[in-house]
Image (cartoon, rainbow, N blue to C red):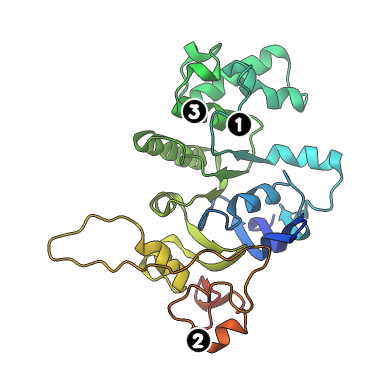
Amino acid sequence: MVDNLLSVEHLKKYFPTHKGNVRAVDDISFSIKRGETLGLVGESGCGKSTTGRVVIRLIDATSGKILFNGEDINKVSSSKLKKLRQGMQIIFQDPYSSIDPRKSVSQIIAKPFKVHHIGTKREIEEKVDRLMEQVGLSARLYNKYPHELDGGRRQRVGIARALALEPSFIVCDEPVSALDVSIQAQILNLLQKLQANMGLTYLFISHDLSVVKHISDRVAVMYLGKIVEVASSSELFRNPLHPYTKALLSAIPIPKLKNQRSERIILEGNVPSPINPPSGCLFHTRCQSCMKKCSEFNPPLKEVAPGHEVACSLY
């Protein structure tokens, strides 16, 4: 078995419009080891969620390879893909719109078993009971409907549904951003507990850097459809290299100690259009360290220290 559960190579996803192609994901490569959590961060609209949906083929890639357990899922048939889907699932951002409001909690969690024709009615009921217990849902909620639950419980329903077929890989697409802060901590702790108990592998997508630091083993930073830096979580927060990463980290609210100064990096201008991105380095129009060659040359992602990759002409 390969060490990497998921390997993405030169992945692209373009959306055609009457003005041109929106380059939502533009030639990115990364891998995730078994049992690892890779955090994917960046501003809204940078392509994080599209990346998550493409790697499990909720939407098809424009080009590139997506190797899951060593097999390129871009090339498999529909019937083979359905079988592979048992090993890959997604937890969505909004715990209300991502579950059917007309179905009860038990019906929502049981749906994957019925789609894949797994188990008898009695076996499914027993599995639903076990899943509800695993994610901390009381048995009294069995016949409740989504509108009768708060956001945290609704998200637990979504997590239980994602776990139903015992996947090895789960895309967590901003799973706590719609929740209150106190509930966020509970859901994050639950995800970590499930990972430890079940050997799960996560792609954790978020714009909240403090959340990503808490849960991720490694972090990839995305800007305008491209990955600009990858490092271990501790290394990235201790020693960010890319100017964009430095600006992101400087925006994290940290309580100030007496007589302590913290420098905030303010980015000028707006994110360029993914339909008509700038030449050279995509970040050079907002970068305070911009040099002449930055507008002419788009640096590839390269390793500048063990396990630390950055796409920047400064290195």
The residue carrying mark 1 is 98
Is there any visible trace of residue 66 in the rendered image?
Answer: yes
Above or below 37: residue 311:
below
* Alpha-carbon span between mark 1 and mark 2: 45 Å
Q: Residue at x 48, y 72 (%)?
A: 286
Q: Residue at x 64, y 58 (%)?
A: 4
Q: In the image shown, does 215 or 242 lie closer to the viewer?
A: 242
Query: For this view, does 241 lie left or right of residue 227?
Result: left
Q: Residue at x 17, y 66 (%)?
A: 260
The residue carrying mark 2 is 291
* Alpha-carbon span between mark 3 and mark 2: 51 Å
- In this view, which residue lies farthest toward the front? 19
Residue 23 picture location, percent across and down:
69, 61
Tag nearer the camera, 3 or 2:
2
First reached walking from the N terminus: tag 1 or tag 2:
1
User: What kind of element bears circle 1?
Assistant: loop
Q: In the image shown, does 273 or 264 lie closer to the viewer?
A: 273
User: What kind of element bears circle 3?
Assistant: loop
The residue carrying mark 3 is 135
Residue 10 picture location, percent across and down:
71, 66
Name the kind of residue labelled 3 in the image.
Answer: Val
Label pair 1/2, CB-CB below 8 angstroms: no
Tag nearer the camera, 1 or 2:
2
